Amino acid sequence: MEESLQRLLNAETKAQQIHGKAEEARERMIQEALQEAKRKEEQFEARLPELHKGFMEKADSRAEQTVAELKKRFNERHAQLREYADVREQNALDAAFAVLIDPQADQD
């Protein structure tokens, strides 16, 4: 019986050693994971200015493109309105000359 108790005691001691090593390994893995997470976070924070710069460059590029498109549409519309105004001005002048030349023409 004493031999059985000794084996049980040895098994318990060995189990405690295994448990202790497992705890140490777990703690080491947790610390390594925390360090890796901190390193990744620092890398990300270091890249923030670069990411921001890239975003701003894209935004500026899109804004410039939009402004160029709006200017183009404005100029096209302005040319159409100018042409329309020129035609209307000519029609008005023709009508005014017709009235000046023949005042009776307006009364028809």
Image: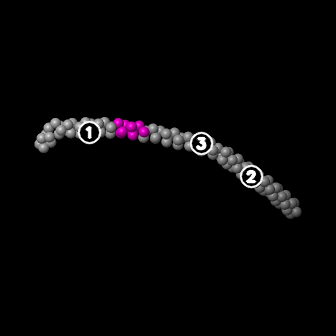
Residue underneath mark 3: 53
Q: Amino acid at mark 2?
A: Gln
Give neighbour class at mark 2: few <14, some 14-19, many 20+ (Cα, 10 Å). few
User: Which residue occupies the foreground of this view, 81 or 69?
Assistant: 81
Q: Is 75 one of the magenta-colored residues?
A: yes
**Mark 3 or mark 1, which has the lower sequence index?**
3
Instruction: Return the mark for residue 31.
Output: 2
Q: What separation in Å lies between label 1 and label 2 (alpha carbons)?
A: 83 Å
Pick the front one: 64 or 90: 90
- Label the magenta part by its dominant secondary structure: helix
Q: Is residue 22 magenta?
A: no
Q: Position of residue 102 (x, y in %)?
A: 14, 38
Give the mark nearest the N terminus, 1 or 2. 2
Position in image of residue 20 (x %, y %): 80, 56
The kind of secondary structure element at disc 2 is helix
Q: Quadrant of the C terminus?
A: top left
Left or right: residue 73 compared with residue 28: left
